Structure formats: C-alpha cells, structure tokens
Image (cartoon, rainbow, N blue to C red):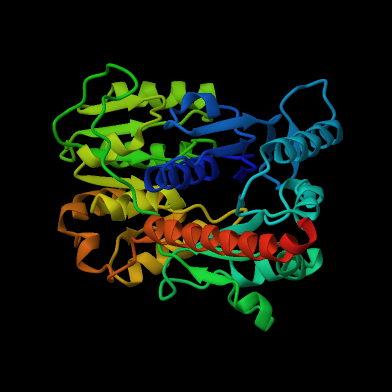
Amino acid sequence: MYSHDTFGLGHLRRCRTIAHSIVEHFKGVSVLIISGSQIAGAFDFKARVDFVKIPSVIKLYNGEYDSIGEYIDIDEILEMRELIIQRTAEAFNPDIFIVDKEPMGLKGELEPTLEMFKSTKTKTVIGLRDVMDSPELLMKEWTQQKMLEKIDDYYDAAWIYGPKHFWNPLEGFDLTDSLANKLEYVGFLDRESQLHPLTEGYSLPDKYILVTAGGGGDGIAIMEQVLAAREHDHQLDFPIVMVLGPFMKSDSRDRIRMRASRLANVTVIDFESRMEVLMQNAVALVGMCGYNTFCEVLSFDKKALFVPRTKPRQEQYIRAKRASEIGLSSMLTPDEAAIPSVMAEALRNLPNLKLPSESLAKGDLAGLDNICVEVHKISEAQKTTSTKVEKILEPQRA
C-alpha cells in the first residue's frame, strides 16, 4: 500500500484500517505500507502489517510542497522517495498494490513503480475517497495532468470508498468504457470498537462531546470557535474533550489550553492514536468532516456537528453538506461557526439531532468487507492465470 502523507493523518489512518481488515480476513497475508507520515511510528499495527517510512514532505497552505529539513532540497527529497518506493516494491514483490488517493503519487513519484508493475504479476488498485474535490477544481487539475488516461493505463481497478448514492467523485468526467468498468463503489470504511486502553493515562468524564480536528494542522479555528461559544454562553457546561492533533503549532496549543483553563468541564488532549476509543465513549462530536472522522461518526452512530474546511480543497465542505442534506449530521460553514451565538445554538441543538443509523442505507458501511471480497477475487484470478500459464508451459518443460 502507498500513502503519500503530506498533510494530516487521513491517508495513513485509511491505509492502516484497510490493512488491518485484510490481515483479519486472510490468514498468511502480509501488508506493507509505504508512508511519508512524520508520525507513522506513533500508531500500533496488527501482526503481519508493517510500514516503510519514506522521507517526509510537508504541504504548504498555498498547495506547494517543501522538505522538512531546512538544509535538504525538495527535489532531492522527491528523488529519494521515488527510489525507495521502487526498490521496496521490487523487494516485496506484491500480489496487489493499493494506492491511496494520489494515482501517480506525490509529484509523479509512483510512475516508475507503476510502469515496472506492468511486466509483473502485481495487480494495481487506486483507492479514491468518496469526495475528492469540487468537480470543477478536480477536472481542471486532472485534465492538465491527463490523470484519467494514466489511471486507465496503469491501474487494474479503482475502488471508491463510499456508496454510489452518496457522491460521485468523478462527476463531470467523460469516462471511457474501459475505465468505467474498473470503478467499484465499495462503501464507507467502517470502524470497529477498540476496547483496549487509551495511549495516555488521562482521566475523562463519563459523558462528553468530543471536539477533534484530525491532525490539527489547520484545526485551531474550530477549537477557538467552540471555546468562544462556551465563553459566550456559560450555561453550556456539558463536558467537552478537545483533541488538538499532532500537527497543531505550539503557540496555538498554548492559546487553546489557556482559554480552556478558564472554563468549566473542558479537557484538552494533545494527541491520541486510538481515536476510536475516544469516539465510542463520546455522546456527540464536533469536527471538520475529514473522511476518517466521518466514517467513525457513522460507524459508532454518533450525532455530529461539522465545520468543514473550504480551502484549498472543497472535499470536506461537499461531504458535510451532502451528509446534512440526507440527515446523517449537521453543518455550519466556517463563517457561521465564527459567530459565538450561532455556534452556541448549534452545540445546544446537538442532542436533538437524529442518529446517523436512522438515515443510513443498507450496505453504506460495508466498505471493508467489500474490499476483502475484491481482494479475494483478484487472488482467485491470479491463481487461475497461474494455472493456465503452467499448463501452457508444461509441454515445453517436457
């Protein structure tokens, strides 16, 4: 599996979830995740799941990329990543190669590896989120890169991590029959309850609203909006647990902690790698509607208020808006959430929301099971092909 990981935790967490499901379903299967995440080592992995760390690259707010190290040129980092990916693929020699979200990888770093796989037994799969971006922005970006042609050329299958009725991530594209036949809507990736203890030994209230911003790199706004609502309306004293995320800047952390210390029933946590545990114990959630958080809300059947990011991509906004339209959750725009009285009213209304389970359709959360079905199909097809080849070669061997 490949996870480019330049901003936040979403890609690695999604790959890890899929990898864990595969090794649980199939005995003897090993999964290796190639990840650029700075904190991949902070997560625990099941037996037969491991990761190879490639040099980290950060995504700037203007959409450009830069190296972590001050004295290392970004072009040198990209060259190193490309070589490590290809050498790892050669050594591991996988039956299946699953790529998360970026078909050609960061700045095209996967292309040599995908070209190499054309002459091997490896089957290649691109995994796309339920929502990639607004149709206009994605079409502009992918048309310039000739991305659909490359996907059709390099990939054997394309899995969409959502149900077909929720959203079409390739809206507006004119797909060839070849590519259309490769698309498979597998459903949202469901999460299972994790009963093991939290990473740290902190104490939490029995019931609380969980406020999370994923990796936290751009999560300061939603944290301050919730605190401002509590400052505005002191009768809003239901316990709140805030998880800042590993990528929130230190001065932002200090600011959040200072404001939270002046309010009753607010607990602040820097980072928790087992978010599923925090999620299942919460009565409701306030978040930004990243893919993993959204799937956890659905899986654990939690009432949720989302304040999605709108830049540089529209992904979270589209997902939150669509979810609110069909009754899965509620939403405020960033401008609405910035008004303390509006956010206070939304927090007060959280207990009155419907549970997601009241609006989910059958099969919406079957993503992991369906992926394992697809893996089994690929495996069986490879066995059949291998048997045919052996039979063809048999007379020549004789």
- In the rendered structure, the answer to whether residue 168 lies left or right of residue 20 reads right
Report how many numbered discs are placed on residues in the image.
0
Q: Report if residue 314 is visible in the image.
A: no
- In the rendered structure, the answer to whether residue 57 lies left or right of residue 247 reads right
- In the rendered structure, the answer to whether residue 86 lies left or right of residue 125 reads right
Q: Is residue 372 above or below residue 5?
A: below
- Nearer to me, 142 or 2: 2
Which part of the image, by quadrant, shows the N terminus? top right
Residue positioned 61% across, 61% down in the render: 387
Residue farthest to the top? Answer: 201
Residue 264 picture location, percent across and down: 20, 27
Residue farthest to the front? Answer: 398
Q: Is residue 234 above or below residue 140?
A: above
- Nearer to me, 347 or 380: 380
Residue positioned 41% across, 52% down in the render: 307
Residue 199 picture location, percent across and down: 34, 22
Q: Report if residue 359 is visible in the image.
A: yes
Which part of the image, by quadrant, shows the C terminus? bottom right
Residue 371 picture location, percent across and down: 45, 58
- Nearer to me, 94 or 78: 94
Residue 308 picture location, percent across and down: 45, 54
Residue positioned 48% across, 24% down in the render: 42
Which quadrant of the figure has residue 280? Answer: top left
